[in-house]
Amino acid sequence: MRETSTSPGAASDEMALVDKPYRDARGDPTASSTAPMSSIRASSGTLRGLSESPVPQGLNTINRTLSASRSEKVRTNGLSKIVKRSQICGARVPNVRNVHREKVSHYTHAMATTASERKLLIGGDWVETGEWLEVRSPYDRSLIGRVAKAGAGETRRALDAAEAAMRDPMLAHERAAILDRVAALLAERSDEAARTISAEAGKPMKAARVEATRAVSTYTMAAVEARRLAGDAVPMDASPAGVGKLAFTLRVPIGIVAAISPFNFPLNLVAHKIAPALAAGCSVVLKPASQTPLSALLLAELETEAGLPPGWLNIVCGPAGEIGDVLVEDERVKLITFTGSSSVGWRLRERAARKRVNLELGNATPVIVAADADLEDAASRLAANAFSFAGQSCISVQRIYVERGAYESFLERYLPRVEALEVGDPADEGTDVGPLIAESERDRVLSWIDDATSRGARVLSGGELDGELLRPTVIADAPRDAKVSSEEVFGPLCTVTPYDTLDEAIALANSTRYGLQAGIFTSDVKSALRAARELEFGGVTVNEAPTFRADQMPYGGVKDSGNTREGPAYAVREMTDERLVVLQL
């Protein structure tokens, strides 16, 4: 899936998992910076507690979330760093187990992380490598922060730590208690999390707040699954061979989980990988997207504050090819969970043929609007869900098929709502549509628009820049084989096409290689149920945009869109093996 995955053009970080050399989302070789933070300049703003040198406004956006009640200034080697009060006074949460008490204490006192620099989490230590990845705002390219850059050596060290952690398993109630505490801590710091998401991903604040809230829900439900994870009874007397025997199954952790997450949901999609793995009793090595690692590292901080013992979560940021090679080739990794583009996902599965590889991939999301539908409701829901986060979601509405008799009436309702969407700075609370993750992605989408219009398509709205931002774009008469109709756009664009029969509409919806989610708006129950049966997708919504997702749902696709189901209850089972036990009575 790409709820979001990396887009076709911004998939360069992913592509390094299967191709070399690694290149970043802008098409340039991965750059690292070893310059001191004091050398960083921007037009305005200072980071209090770090230096009086001007720093980018993006840093101040994050800094404003660090309230005086939660932080103090500490002078260290002439550099003033922001340190949480809990790091000075000790952990606020009791240790889960006495055996881990000393190690958990080491976690909290070792942080001392500035708001502008983040270290890697490996084996309970916050690690600096001497090289840095710069994290820049997709909106204005200002510097948000720097993250320690990992390579093959750090990744192997992370696997060593994950392997050591699993030698001392946590009991189900211990895992559940930690997950509950992470949920509580994340709820307490949800505003900080939302601002971090917005700053590094360019996601409008209203959408970033929703993501932060959803991540709390993901952890809460994972805690439930940790407590109820169980096997099944086997009815042995169902056959003569089983008489006199008792049998049941156990769910046992599969082993180390390697998680690779995309840029577009940098907090909640990380949560959907870490939380179920911990609930299942698996240790994790996570590689977040290079464009958006800060949210994942914030989540790691909360995990340690919640009392997670060392080694159960390790985070490495850096070149996808170098890190990915280790994760794919090391036999200690038993499962790889990947969210990203279809081409990279399937090739990754080919490379890791002997591992369990769970894929959540892309989509070209279709919606059918029947003439008997509530057109006002359909237009309102689809306008919001075609362009939220600039369309950078695998289930962003992309193809709208409207019954011919209602086509003009639908457009009369739909286009004004699209044109009313606010395009601008993602940090502004009123913004609906912000930037694409990189200029190269914006240029790619513009080229797809040009391709469609050169073949007879008409732009009904948008199709042009508002400053540096691409306005929400609606296209009519797009050829079926145009990229805007057949591939995942992953940008603020949708097509609107009339149809004559439900047979035709279903055939059009099924005509791409994707199959994640689809939708239908209709007042006819028979049409709705027929669509649910015949649409070749992992999920079908009725009178709701197919962009809808609640985090407890089984979420995943068919065809090129993936091979698994997320949602804590479903992911936990995939991260465990079923073990049969037979007793002779």
Image (cartoon, helix red, strand yellow):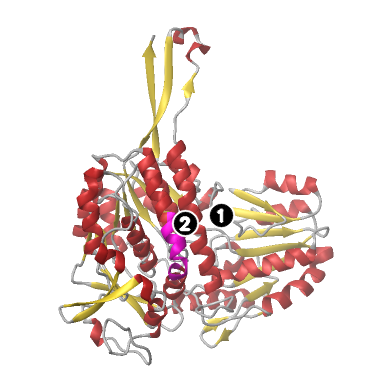
Left/right placement of residue 111 relative to residue 187 reads left
What crowding class fits label 1: few (fewer than 14 Cα within 10 Å), some (14-19), or many (20 or more)?
many
Q: Residue at x 32, y 58 (%)?
A: 92
Report if residue 100 is visible in the image: yes
68 or 257: nearer the viewer: 68
Q: Relative to residue 311, is residue 198 depicted above or below?
A: below
368 or 137: nearer the viewer: 137
Q: Residue at x 77, y 72 (%)?
A: 413
- Residue 241 in picture, x, y percent from top left: 45, 8
The residue where tag 2 is placed is 342
Q: CA distance from mark 1 to mark 2?
A: 9 Å
Q: Earlier in the sequence, mark 1 or mark 2?
A: 2
Q: Are the residues tagged 1 and 2 within 8 Å (C-beta)?
A: yes
Left/right placement of residue 285 relative to residue 403 reads left
The residue where tag 1 is placed is 514
Give the extent of the magenta segment. Answer: 183-193
Q: Amino acid at mark 2?
A: Ser
- Residue 260 in picture, x, y percent from top left: 37, 56
Extreme residue toward the bottom, this view: 43
Magenta-colored stretch includes residue 191: yes
